[in-house]
Structure formats: structure tokens, C-alpha cells
Image (spheres, rainbow, N blue to C red):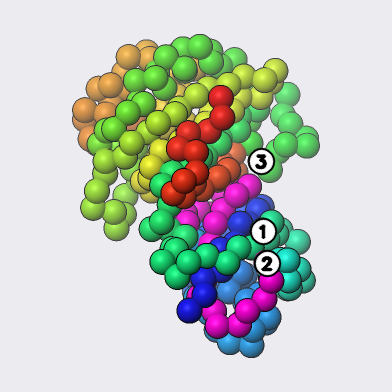
Amino acid sequence: MPVIKLTLEYDGSSYAGWQRQPNRPTIQEAVETAVERVVQAKVPVIGAGRTDAGVHALGQVASFRIERILTPHNWVRALNAHLPASITVLAAELMPDTFHARYSATGKLYEYRIFNRPERPALDRLFCWHIRKPLDEATMGRAAASLIGEHDFSSFQTQPTDNDDPVCHLKRLAVIREGHRLRIEAYADRFLKQMVRSIVGTLVEVGLGKRPPEVVESILDARDRSSAGRTAPPNGLFLVRVDYENALETPEQ
């Protein structure tokens, strides 16, 4: 049965995350409802990443199996006609029947956005974490460097979780300042529950001088969530891209 791959952009502000939940609006539910309206049948839609409540996406990937054949262009037009304004299908592709949005993925790129100035933001207020006190991005970058590599990231995993393997290969963790804005880019083969937000919360404590940059190594060794910093708010987090076989393993520098 043919597999359709979708690339999605969405504003997660008013959703309880990707995964369908009873009595709460979710991205998965909205996409499945749109597919059902197009094909007049219920079709399960699988997401590459189960983004949390309030988290956004610039390049989430989803897939579903369907016998009805439409051109990629027509899938995009038909689904967008039935989706709310906060969710957009950017592209559709016909894939081999072995393709699976989640299990075929080889890497994911997340970006966390911080607005760093005393005055609150007006335009970016729904899509960033506002931190009034100055952040030392160079110190944050030194702390981030200690997290790159293959590690047990249990200290940065929120419980409870259904994930039995806490080992991830974090290939890139960069802190980039652009005026009042800081971007934290994280690229790995996989991520644990709220891992990026937990790392960001810890790096912010380093940037505020509350922890030395060397502390992240002992946090990793502790394998205990209470040893790390707070979980950063969800509204600053974006799933930027999902990579698959034959795609670039690391983002462009």
C-alpha cells in the first residue's frame, strides 16, 4: 500500500502536543481529520516526533498508508483546505512502502529561541523564552560542548516516559547570539522526553552564572533529572527538520 510522507509547519500554541489525546486538541487529530475529509475514511497518521504541548514545528514529518492515489501537489492542496490556519502541509511525497516517519528517521534538528533583554517582546512573545537578565552565551557554549557525543541523557529526561533507552548521540549543540536573540540548535539521532528543554534550562542557569560550565559533566554522570536545571518553557522550541537515509546527517554550518 502506498505511503504518503508529509512535511508540516505548525504553531503549537493552542495544541496539547502532537499525539492524539481525549478531549484535548492535538496536531495528530487535526491532520487525521483532514485526511479523513479528503479520502472519506479514517487513516492513522504517524509523526516523526511527538512534540509536547506548546511546541512548534518548521519541518515536522508525518506519514500514512492509503490506497487512494493523488499527486503530491493535490495532497498538499486538499489537506490544507481542511486544516486550521495554525497547521500547514508544506510538501507531500510518495514513498516506498518501507518508509515510516518515526522509525526511518536518522536525525532531528531542534531550535530553541530565547529573547534576552530587559524589555518584554511584543512580536516574538508567543515563540520565545523571555529572559531579562544578560546571558553569557560564550559560557553557555562551553557547557554545551561537554554534552556533545554519545551519552546517557537520563539527567535530561522528564519522567514518566515509555523510553527504555536513554542513550542518544548528540551531534551538535550550539548557542548562537543574534542581537537580543539567542538560538540554541540541537541535532541528534534521537531525543528523550523534554530533553532539549531540560538542556536549555540548564544552559540558561550557566549563562546567568548560577552554575559553572563544568557542572554539565557531573550532571550527565548523575543520571538523575533532579541534578539538572529547570525545564525551559515549550513556546521557545521548534522542530526544524527531520532527516532520513541519504540526507545530510548534520545541519549546514
In this picture, which residue range is highlighted in magenta?
48-72
Structural distance between the alpha carbons of marks 3 and 2: 30 Å
Q: Secondary structure at mark 3?
A: loop
Which residue corresponds to the image point at 69% horizontal and 71% vertical from the top-left? Answer: 71
Q: Is residue 67 above or below residue 26?
A: below
Q: Which quadrant does the C terminus fall into?
A: top right
Residue denoted by label 1: 91
Which residue corresponds to the image point at 61% horizontal and 57% vertical from the top-left? Answer: 7
Locate residue 20, reporting x and y percent: 50, 69
Marks 1, 2: nearer the viewer: 2
Q: Is residue 160 above or below residue 126?
A: below
Residue denoted by label 3: 127
The amino acid pointed to by label 1 is Ala
Residue denoted by label 2: 72
Locate residue 126, reporting x and y percent: 68, 43
Cβ atoms at labels 1 and 2 below 8 Å apart? yes
From the viewer's perspective, is 145 left or right of 179? Answer: left
Dot 3 or dot 1: first in sequence order is 1
Dot 1 or dot 2: first in sequence order is 2
Instruction: Inspect the magenta stretch and tell me whether residue 231 lies in it.
Output: no
User: Which one is nearer the viewer's eye here, 52 or 252?
Assistant: 252
